[in-house]
Image (cartoon, helix red, strand yellow):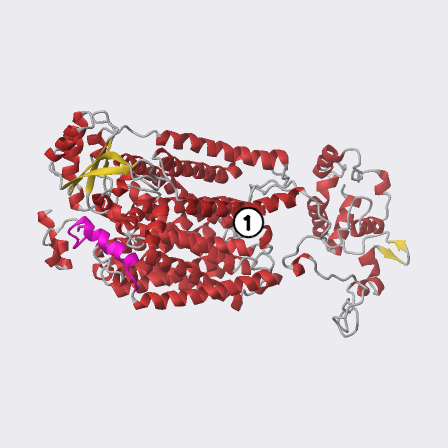
Amino acid sequence: MAKYANVNELSDSQLDNLLEPPALVQNAETFHDITESVCSIAEADRMPRSWYVLFTLALCFLGVLGAMIFHLFTTGVGVWGNNQPVAWGFPIVNFVFWVGIGHAGTLISAVLYLFRQGWRTGINRFSEAMTIFAVCCAGLFPAIHVGRVWVIYWVFPIPNQMDMWPNFRSPLLWDVFAVGTYFTVSLLFWYMGMVPDLATQRDRAKTKLRQFLYGIFALGWNGSNRHWHRYERAYLLLAALATPLVLSVHSVVSFDFAVAQIPGWHTTIFPPYFVAGAIFSGFAMVLTLSIPARALFNFKHIITMRHIELMCKVIMCTGMLVGYAYAMEFFMAWYSGNRYEGFTFVNRAFGPYAWAYWTMVSCNVISPQIFWFKRARRCIPLIFVISIFVNIGMWFERFVITVTSLNRDFLPSSWNYFSPTIVDVLTLAGSFGLFFTLFLLFCRWLPQVAISEVKNVMPSAHPHGNHGEVNHD
Amino acid sequence: MTNQTSIHGILAEFDSVDGILHAAEKVKQEGYRKWDCHTPFPVHGLDGAMGIRQTRLPWLVLVMGFAGCSGGILLQWWTNAHDYVYRISGKPDWSLPANIPVAFEMTILFAALTAFFSMWILNGFPRWYSPLFRAKCFTRATDDRFVLAIDARDDLFGEETRKLLESLSPSTIEMIEAPIEDGKIPLKLKGILGIALTLLLLPPAMIANARFTKSTQPRVHIVPNMDTQVTHRGQEASDFFADGQAMRLPISGTYAQEDDRLIGEQVGFWTGKENGAYLSSIPMDVTPEFEDRGRARFGIYCSACHAVNGSGQGTVHLRAQELLSKTWVGPTDLRTDAIKQQAPGQLFESISNGIRNMPSYSSQIPAADRWAIVQYLKESL
């Protein structure tokens, strides 16, 4: 431990030179420092002023969402711009957008865990929370889209007086199972990871109410190694189960399109293309959230420059994957010799929605290319702007896929230009209100960083004696 | 609660990973059985030092994963291929590929729920109270201290235990005195929980009641205008429009397209009749191209029922015989004399307006092509 004792006095660049690879946790001497810097946020009497500003703003947008949903339920789906031929408008676009964002959390938690990527510990809690809230927003849209929301339970195989069952051959029903499973597993994963940290907060709590509430949710965790043993095993299993799950969910979402016969949708490239896009947008959202949060809550030693750089690399890589998918779609449209497919893609890039298509291409394919340069990967304001660009680009990707494929279908007489109504736009804006309200509450009351996991990757967490040999006796 | 106390156990607190590992090895060597280490994070190597056996959790997860998979397949088969069969576009009632996504998700769901819940159950959670929480040093076991606890119920527990722990150079040693009656939930909390659970049962009870009883009241319409909408028939009155009619008139100057055809000079070409009599010849120039077109149109539109050779044994007929053999009226054999003797105009009329089971083809085949088919029927079939 003495080797790391004077780490505080070093600058970022000195640290980088000294430690190869750079330390996952910087400027923290002891385990207690980690506990202190994470728990002190939830224990503080007041938050930084910007938190209150953001929370008020988020609540306003949440109110708008509530008003729009009330208007929708009492009037009907006619308040949206959905109509023939674009019968799938904003709701499905927003659904796929939010589900996509929800994928980075599980990817960081599960896939990086399986690959033993220690750097995930700084950002995993954060991105898991993001996943849960993004999936909440995603689930909202199909639910309110059904028109008669009071019979939404028809999507579940519940015995009923009509003696009817849902159609299991419909990709929309696969969605119910995939997104439902995904939400459940993500929630379990998030909560389970949080229990030891909730116990830490319980043990530090000063007031009775906090002791009671954190105590209830900590379930009585006492750090027993016999418990840790099963806990770690279960965590590994959940990670192993969540990994194929995260790939399956966006594949199933892509089936909503790919199983239909519409040119521009009916392609086999959709599942991998959608999964790459989901990881892309999810990492962008993690950056959008973590950059302000690490500044606001002083997490710069836990979410380090190295984390940000690695995430930039993931964004650049997945950005090129989606760029490849865009190109491959055009190639297949030409190579298949199917003139309807060909028309759809020419129409996409040069038709009435060319503005949306080129917005998507510039945000998703061109803008992340700047991350080839190390200076760009270390320039926080630039990274923040690019992450916003990617979010915008990925929303437009779903818009382009949905709307351009539908607005000029097989029958030219029904071609029409889709325009959203004000209710569409406000519902989308309101969903951000829901997301940020939940996220800011999470930042306020729950451990934002996986305390026990971060401690586990600190140098002092590894034994220095020869205990290993004794164990095998 | 009484004030009577007994010894629950003894705690030794260490401030480093090496300290707890060393201590765990020693305590294990001494042969203690009821003891544990409490650490803020899973310490690498401690499982081995304590001699913890592998948990059987993975096997439970595996079994429940299989159960989820087979349950998912069974659910889909029973609901969609057995109890309520979906017949869509001639697809088979049961085809596994379409059922894989749901079966997969069910596998993951069951396995994940099992991993989560059986981990807590095997660990004995939730257990909100433990006598260990009474120890002063224990609050830091979730922060930065490593605590070794030996239970007083262990056979070897005694004076030597304390000496053993002291020899391991811990930072603190603490005896835990536990009240005999510990871990009781306060009565007030029990009351609140009881009331909350009872209230939670109310909605399902009301739903169950509504499901199995009859009511004279109409059902509740949450949004009435989506359930019952005002609809009008053709000649009904309506307050909505100024003229008091529900039906709208065509805009002025509208006339039917057919009018030209039925009263114009080409009435024979459009209807196959002139002055009430069927045309006895084709009212078009018969060229080789015209005959080829007739053959092609016959192949496209007629052969599905009448067969390529006109025998009436087309694929639609064969399939219909299989499905509705008792009520099916088959297509006419077009090679018979009864057909051959018909005037071209009559054949044209049958194609245009339909006859018996055969529907009208005037909307699908342009008039010139219908005449081409008539030519093909008369001359080539």
Asked which quadrant contains residue B123, the reply is: top left
Looking at the figure, which quarter contains the N terminus of chain B?
A: top left
Q: Give the magenta part as a residue range.
A: A23-47
Q: Position of residue A306 (x, y in %)?
A: 22, 54
Q: Is residue A170 left or right of residue B21?
A: right
Give whichever of A102, B63 is nearer the camera.
B63
Mark yes or no: residue A401 visible: no
Residue B303 percent across, percent down from the top left: 71, 42
Taking depth in this image into account, of B144 and A179 the one nearest to the observer is B144
Observer-nearest of A220 and B211: A220
- Measuring from the top left, give residue A366's x and y in whole percent: 33, 61
Q: Is residue B23 left or right of residue B364?
A: left
Q: Which residue is mark 1?
A: A261
Which structural element holds mark 1? Answer: loop
Instruction: Identify residue type, mark 1.
Output: Gln
- How crowded is the residue under tag 1: few (<14 C-alpha within 10 Å), some, or many (20+)? few
Compared with A429, A119 (above or below) is above
How many dots with numbers?
A: 1
Q: Quadrant of the C terminus of chain B?
A: top right
Query: Which chain is mark 1 on?
Result: A
Report x, y in % for residue A352. Answer: 50, 66
Look at the picture and state if B78 lies above or below A135.
above
Any part of residue B313 in sight: yes
Residue B134, magenta (yes or no): no
Does residue A8 appear left or right of residue A319 in this picture? left
Q: Hey, which residue is sitting farthest right in the picture?
A: B276
Decide: is B334 above or below B152: below
The residue shown at (48%, 40%) is B101
Is A46 magenta? The answer is yes
